[in-house]
Every structure is written in structure tokens, then in C-alpha cells.
Image (tube, rainbow, N blue to C red):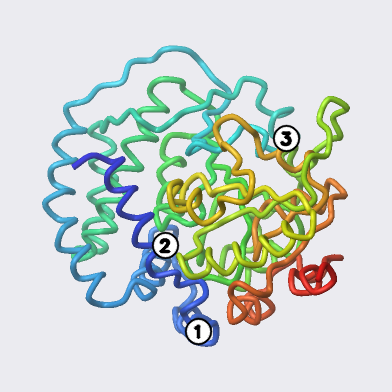
């Protein structure tokens, strides 16, 4: 069972449950507040793990935990046999997870001149790593799924430290319950762990209790959001990264009146989006749809949005996509934040999932406080 396979399972579970909208915010807040103040980074990760398992529900938690024990032992022995040799010195290693390097803030690039990207596909565990993991096992002897994720992550970090001897590791991994354990692990290697915000955030206890040496967020509103989720207060740095600061490019012309940026919508929601976008199309407006690279089923998108231009996410960057549209449309998305900073009109979809839109304020969605138009108003004005 490969690490890539485990990631695919995780994505499917996340999309199927859609807990960010289905799990009541009041219940999340009550659960997050029931924990005592964490005594250390191990406990922070454990509390975050508990919050995520609460979102999964007891049956799924039980199944994941049972399956994790033999897989943990397999990986533990497998990665112990792997050795990573020193290759070259680097100021920092960036675990990008497939995300573009322009999400790294400029101040970090100025501080760390030589940043090496890593796809996290190499693993190794030293004797010191095993000793560190034993401390975790002793603290939480029955949390086998926690073990599994920590074994995988620490083996990736260990390999990077051995290969590049960096001063820092840069991650975009606050949604992982391994985050605070990894901060503690990096300290044993005299390495700083710096996390950077890479996507839109709502109140969701999946992201609770995190602690890094530094955590770069896009605005004070996001720092306050994480603090309300009981993240450590002193870690936050506020800086807008290049990924949000899209500059006009004279070679890119406006091709579309509206581009819809998809997320993890279910089939019935996609059909509702298609129905409303087709109304705009039938009134002479040019429409594009951009699938989500992680969640979207390409064939389903092609079937539902036959009337629109469907962007190839491997050929057209998100920056190019935004520069060629007049209006960026989504329920909630990082793309709307990028559009806002680029001076492109943002349209929030209040039609395809009205119950989700109604919940956005409760979830503390930052873009609701910025100038925007609703899709319902747009469709109505076009008729």
C-alpha cells in the first residue's frame, strides 16, 4: 500500500463527507473548547487528531485506526532500511505538495536564498528518528492512525534533512494533525519549521491546535481565525504572497465574461451550476469552467458543461486563467482571493448550494467582507 494510494483514499473520504459544511459550527466550537491547554507539541497534534477523527465519526475512525496498525509496522520497518545520503547544502527545503512556488512569501525568499523544492517521495528513518517516534507511541499507544501519518511524515522530513542539511523546512500542511509533532521533530534537528497559507480558510476544526515556528497567513483575519481554533498565538506572520498578487500581462487578452472555479461539488450541485451558467451563455456571454485539479472528475465536468470552454489545468495556470476573465465565480475559493487582489470582479455563488452559502458567514469567510456580486443577481440581471 503506497503513500500515494493513502492520499487518494483521504481525498475521497474528504470529498464524500464534505464536513466543512455538514458538521455544525456550534458543535465544532464546543468540541474544540473542551480540550485543556496543550502541554506540548505532541499534545497539540493529538488534540488536532481527535478533532479530525470527530469529524470522520466513530465507525470510520475505528476502521482507519485498525487498518493503520499493520500499515504502520510495515512502513516503520521499510523506512528503517532506507538511507539518504547528503547531496548538497540548501538554506531551506520546500515541501510543496504539488503547489506552485509562488505561494512562498517574498520575505522568506529573501531570508533563504537557496530553497530546494521537494515532492516528498523519499523516505528514511534513522535510529534517532525511531527514538523520537517511540516517545509518541508511548504517549498515545492506541492512536494507530496518528502513528501512521507521523511515521510517513517524519520519514520524509528525515530524508530531506539528511540530503540537504537545511536551516528550515517550509510546508503548507496545517490541515495535517502531524503538524505540531513535525515542529517538535525539526527542533531535534536544529531546523525551523515554517508553514505558509496556501488556500482559503473557514472555521473548521480540522485545522485546530497547530503550532509552527512561523506561520505565514494572508491577513489578520486569518490569524484570528486560526487562534479561534486554538492555534498557538505567537506563530503568525502576515504577508500576501506573489500567488495572490497577479499582475496584468499585455499578452493575455480578456476572453471570457465569467469563469467558474470548481471545488469539491457533488453531481447535483454541478448540474445546478451548469444550469445557471448556461443561462448566461444563452444571453451571449462567454463562459469558461476550471475544474479543481484534486477533486474534479474530468469526464463528469465535460459532460455537464458541454456549452462552456473547459480549462486544462495542466496547460493554463491559475494566473493566466484569471487574467483572461472579467469575473471570477465560485462559492468560496482561494481564486476569489486572488481575483480580489488583482482587481478582478468576484462573484459568489449563492444558487448551486444555498444552504452552504447561508453558512459562509458562520464559517467566517473573509471574502464576504469584501466587494462582491452574487451569482443570483448576475443571472437575474441577464434575463
Residue hosting label 1 = 24
The residue that appears at 65% across and 66% down in the rendered structure is: 331
The residue that appears at 34% across and 55% down in the rendered structure is: 10
- On the rendered image, what quadrant is the N terminus found in? top left
Near mark 3 (Cα within 10 A), the count class, few <14, some 14-19 or many ≥20, is some
Query: Mark 1 or mark 2, which is nearer to you?
Result: 2
User: Does 124 sit above or below residue 196?
Assistant: above
> In the rendering, which numbered label is found on residue 131?
none
Query: Mark 3 or mark 1, which is nearer to you?
Result: 3
Coordinates of residue 246 in the picture (x, y in percent):
80, 39
Query: Which badge, 1 or 2, comes first in the chain's sequence?
Result: 2
Residue hosting label 2 = 15
Query: Which badge, 3 or 2, comes first in the chain's sequence?
Result: 2
Q: CA distance from mark 1 to mark 2?
A: 17 Å
Q: CA distance from mark 3 to mark 2?
A: 27 Å
Q: Secondary structure at mark 1?
A: loop
The one of 344 and 241 positioned closer to us in this rendering: 344
Coordinates of residue 205 in the picture (x, y in percent):
49, 71
Residues at circles 1 and 2 in contact by the CB criterion of under 8 Å: no
Query: Mark 3 or mark 2, which is nearer to you?
Result: 3
Coordinates of residue 297 in the picture (x, y in percent):
43, 50
The one of 313 and 59 positioned closer to us in this rendering: 313
Query: Which badge, 3 or 1, comes first in the chain's sequence?
Result: 1
Residues at circles 3 and 2 in contact by the CB criterion of under 8 Å: no
Residue hosting label 3 = 320
Q: Secondary structure at mark 3?
A: helix
Amino acid at each position: 500500500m503506497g503513500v500515494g494510494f493513502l492520499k487518494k483514499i483521504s481525498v475521497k473520504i474528504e470529498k464524500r463527507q464534505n464536513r466543512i459544511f455538514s458538521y455544525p459550527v456550534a458543535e465544532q466550537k464546543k468540541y474544540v473548547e473542551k480540550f485543556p491547554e496543550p502541554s506540548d507539541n505532541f499534545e497539540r497534534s493529538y488534540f488536532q487528531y481527535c478533532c479530525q477523527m470527530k469529524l470522520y465519526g466513530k465507525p470510520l475512525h475505528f476502521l482507519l485506526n485498525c487498518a493503520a496498525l499493520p500499515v504502520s509496522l510495515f512502513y516503520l520497518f521499510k523506512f528503517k532500511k532506507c538511507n539518504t545520503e547528503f547531496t548538497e547544502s540548501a538554506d531551506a527545503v520546500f515541501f510543496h505538495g504539488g503547489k506552485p512556488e509562488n505561494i512562498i512569501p517574498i520575505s522568506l525568499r529573501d531570508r533563504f536564498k537557496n530553497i530546494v523544492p521537494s515532492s516528498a517521495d523519499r523516505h528514511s528513518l534513522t535510529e534517532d528518528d525511531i527514538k523520537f517516534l517511540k516517545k509518541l507511541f508511548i504517549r498515545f499507544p492506541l492512536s494507530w492512525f496518528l502513528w501512521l501519518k507521523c511515521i510517513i511524515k517524519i520519514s520524509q522530513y528525515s530524508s530531506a534533512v539528511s540530503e540537504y542539511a537545511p536551516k528550515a523546512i517550509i510546508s503548507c500542511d496545517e490541515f495535517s494533525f502531524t503538524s505540531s509533532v513535525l515542529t517538535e521533530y525539526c527542533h531535534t534537528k536544529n531546523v525551523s519549521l515554517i508553514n505558509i497559507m496556501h488556500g482559503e480558510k473557514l472555521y473548521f476544526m480540522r485545522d485546530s491546535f497547530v503550532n509552527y515556528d512561523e506561520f505565514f497567513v494572508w491577513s489578520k483575519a486569518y490569524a484570528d481565525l486560526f487562534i479561534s481554533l486554538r492555534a498557538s498565538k505567537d506563530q503568525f506572520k502576515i504577508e500576501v504572497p506573489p500567488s495572490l498578487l497577479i499582475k496584468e500581462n499585455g499578452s493575455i487578452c480578456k476572453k471570457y465574461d465569467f469563469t467558474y472555479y470548481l471545488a469539491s461539488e457533488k453531481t447535483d450541485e454541478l448540474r445546478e451550476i451548469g444550469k445557471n451558467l448556461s443561462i448566461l451563455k444563452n444571453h451571449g456571454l462567454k463562459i469558461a469552467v476550471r475544474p479543481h485539479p484534486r477533486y474534479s472528475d474530468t469526464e463528469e465536468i465535460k459532460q455537464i458543461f458541454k456549452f462552456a470552454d473547459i480549462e486544462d489545468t495542466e496547460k493554463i495556470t491559475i494566473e493566466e486563467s484569471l487574467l483572461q476573465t472579467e469575473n471570477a465565480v465560485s462559492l468560496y475559493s482561494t481564486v476569489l482571493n486572488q481575483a480580489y487582489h488583482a482587481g478582478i470582479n468576484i462573484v459568489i455563488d449563492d444558487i448551486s448550494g444555498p444552504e452552504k452559502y447561508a453558512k459562509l458567514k458562520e464559517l467566517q469567510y473573509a471574502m464576504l467582507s469584501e466587494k462582491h456580486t452574487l451569482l443570483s443577481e448576475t443571472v437575474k440581471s441577464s434575463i
